[in-house]
Every structure is written in C-alpha cells, then in structure tokens.
Image (cartoon, grey):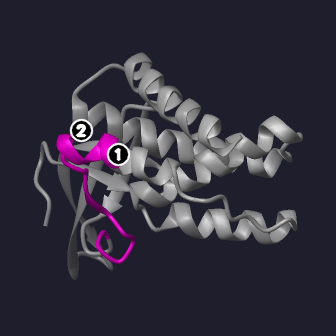
Amino acid sequence: MFCVGDKIVYPMYGAGIIEDLEHKSIDGGLTNNVYYVLNIPVGNLKIMLSANKAVGLGVREISHEDEVVDIIESIMSEPIDMPENWNERYKLNMEKIKTGRLSEAALVFRNLMIREQKRVLSSAEKKVLTSAKQVILSELILSLNIEKSEAEAILMRTLEKSVFAVN
C-alpha cells in the first residue's frame, strides 16, 4: 500500500503524488475501502483511486531519477515497428500505454511523432500521442523534480536524436 506523499504512476494518466487517503464505506458500511487522492501535475488532474485495485490497474512507483532519462533514451534508439493499418496501430499503442511502463509510453510517443512528420495523424492518434506525452512528462517532472518546460526540453532533445538516427 502506498502512503501520502508517495509518487506513483497511474497508467493512462501519468505520474502524480498521493495527497490524501480517504476511507469510504460501501454497501451501507459493510466494507470500508481506502482510496488514494492522486494529484497529477501535467493536466492538473485530481483522481481518486481504490487502493485495493491499484496494483491490478498497473499502478507503480515512479522511476528513480537515475533511470528515467536512460529509459527514454534507450527506447528512442529502438527500431520503429508500427502496423500500417491505423486501427491495429491504435489498438497496439493503447495497449502499450495501459501497461504504465515508461518505456512503452516512450515508444508510442516516438513512433507517433515520427509518423506525424510524414503524414497527418487521425484525431484518435493525436489523443494517444497526447496521453503518451503526458505520461512521460509527468514522470520526468516528479522523478527529476523539474518544471514542465524543462521536462519538455529533455523529451524533445531525446526525440531529435532518435529522429536523426532513423533518417
């Protein structure tokens, strides 16, 4: 179980800080459930998350500051492997983001950014791109204790190296 002040990643939403633990009675007070009140800085989101379901949803601690940039950089050099069919691509990208792993979000972000340079993304893929970016930025911000603008600069520098290596 996580505690107030812990920094965690909630797949599809990104990294946040547990601000509070709330106890809620369900079924007329027969069960007392604990909920995390999670503040996600990117997008300024506040989410209540059942502590009992957190692990099953893929919630994890944020990556250590020594690892976070290395994870993103190592992924950026992997070969691009995307289906041409947008429906298959969308499904695959959503599955990767739902894992909650930084490496998977970075792959989705990199692949869609490169694809966007070559052709226009559908509105659905733009949303996936935005979700992947939010997951990455929020983890960079909390792991490195930096501002959003610094996190964006790190991400874009890393992406530029990747695009340069691919072309």
The disc, 1 or 2, on the residue closer to the chain's N-terminal end is 1
Q: Position of residue 149 (x, y in %)?
A: 43, 17
The tag on residue 25 is none
Above or below, 52 against 42 in this view is: below
The residue under the point 76% across, 50% down is 125
Crowd rating for badge 1 (residues with CA inside 10 Å; few <14, some 14–19, many 20+): many
Compared to residue 53, the image places residue 81 above or below, namely above
Name the residue type under label 1: Ala
Q: Secondary structure at mark 2?
A: helix
The magenta segment is: 54-70
Query: Where 30 sits versus 64, above or below?
Result: below
Q: Nearer the viewer, residue 101 or 43?
A: 101
Q: Amino acid at mark 2?
A: Ser
- The tag on residue 15 is 1
* Residue shown at 66% from the left, 45% from the top: 166
Q: Secondary structure at mark 1?
A: strand
Instruction: Identify the residue position indicated by label 2 in the image.
Output: 143
1 or 2: mark nearer the eye: 2
Rendered location of residue 75, percent (x, y): 47, 53
